[in-house]
Image (cartoon, rainbow, N blue to C red):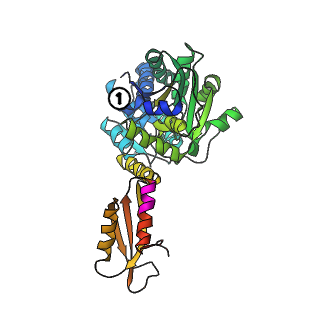
Amino acid sequence: MRETPVLSSRTLSDGAGTTIALKAENLQRTGSFKLRGAFAKIASLGDHTANGVVCGSAGNHAQAVAYAARTLGVSCEVFMPVAAPISKVEAAEALGATVHMVGISVDESIAAALARAAEARMAFIHPFDDPEVVAGQGGVGLELLRQVPDMGRVVVPVGGGGLVSGVAIAIKSVRPDVEVVGVQVEACASFPASLRAGEPIAVGSARTIADGIAVKRPGALTLKLIDDWVDQILLVSEDEVAEAMVFLLERSKLVVEGAGAVGVAALLSGKLSGPTRGTTVLILSGGNVDAGLLAEVARRQETQRGRRMVLQLRIPDRPGVLAAVLSLIGELGANVVDVQHTRERLDLHIQETAIQLVLETRGTEHAAAVREQLADAGYREVAWGD
C-alpha cells in the first residue's frame, strides 16, 4: 500500500478559522482507499480464492479487487451498474478483470455478484459490509494517527460505511477524544433514516455525481459500527459537491471525484460546525472521475460564478450586424466561446434573426456590465421559446 500524503490548505483553514488538512486517498494506487480493504479481504481468504473472486461495485471497489487479485495471482470478475463511469470500467478491465454491466445501482450489482459467486463457487468480496474489508479501510485511520498528532476531528465520505467505520475504530481506539464525522450526499442518503430505525432502510434514488457513495441500503455490520463509533452524519447537495470538486481542482490542484469531495463540500457550505480543538482532517476518498463529467462540472460552476454566460439576442438580419455585436463584446473584454445562429423557432420579423452566444467573463459584475452595454446598443435579449 502507498501511505498517502496529508496536505495543508491555507484557503480552507482561513475560511474555517481552524487548521484544515486533506488526506489524499485520491493518490492511492487505483485512485481510491478501496485497495486497502480489497487486499485485506483477499489475503484473509487463502485457498478459498481457488476459483477466483467476484465483487459488485460502482467502480472504485471493482478496480481495487481487480488490482489486488492480479497482484495475488487470482482470477477476478466484477459487476458494475450500467451507468458506471467509463473510466472506471476501462480501468478494471485493464487490470485483468472480467466486467459485467448489470442494473442501475450498486445494490443490484452486488446482488448479481452474489449470484455469480454461488454459481461458480467464487469468493465474494463485499465492498463494505465485511469485517476484513472494514479493518483494511481502517489503515487510513492508523496513518492519520501518525501523520496528524494534533488531530481533533476527521471528516469521512460515507457510502456503504466501510471507510468511516474502519477509520473511526482505528482512531477512537487510540484517541477516543477525536470527533468522527461522516458525510453523505442528499440524493442517496441512506444512513440517517436507518440509524433512526435501527435497521437498514433503502432509499429510492441513487442518481448523483457522487457515484462512488451511491449506496441505497447500508450494511447491517456498518450500520451498527457507525451507530457505535461515529459522532454525526452530515448531508450535502449536488451543487455543493460540484463546487467542492472545482475548488479542489483550482486551489489544491487535485482531481477528486464527487464521492471524495463531500467532506470539503460540508466545510465550504457551512454545514460542518466551526473551529474545533486541533486539526480537522478531510479525507479525499477517491479521484476516479470521467474527464467529461469533470469538464461539465467545471463549466457549470463557471456559469454560476458569472465567469461564463449565455446570451440570446434578437438582431437585424443584415450584413455586418453580427460582426458589430462580436466587436462590441470584444471591446467590453469578454471572450466568445460559441455562437449559434437561427431564423427558426422564434417569432421573428422577416428581417430579423437570433443568435445565442456563450461568453467567458471575469465574474458577475463584468457579466452584468456586458449585458447592460449590449442592451444599450439596442440588442434585445430573448429566450429561444419566445
Residue 125 visible at all: no
Which residue is farthest bottom?
Answer: 350
Tag 1: amino acid: Arg
Q: Is 336 placed left or right of 198 in the picture?
A: left
Q: Residue at x 31, y 73 (%)?
A: 324
| Residue 365 part of the magenta segment | yes
Q: Is 188 placed left or right of 195 in the picture?
A: left
Which residue is farthest right?
Answer: 197
224 or 55, nearer to the observer: 224
| Residue 137 part of the magenta segment | no
Q: Residue at x 46, y 18 (%)?
A: 148
> Mark 1 — residue?
29
Residue 20, given in percent of the width and then of the height, sits at: 48, 27
294 or 116, nearer to the observer: 294
Q: Quadrant of residue 33?
A: top left
Residue 213, given in percent of the width and then of the height, sits at: 51, 38
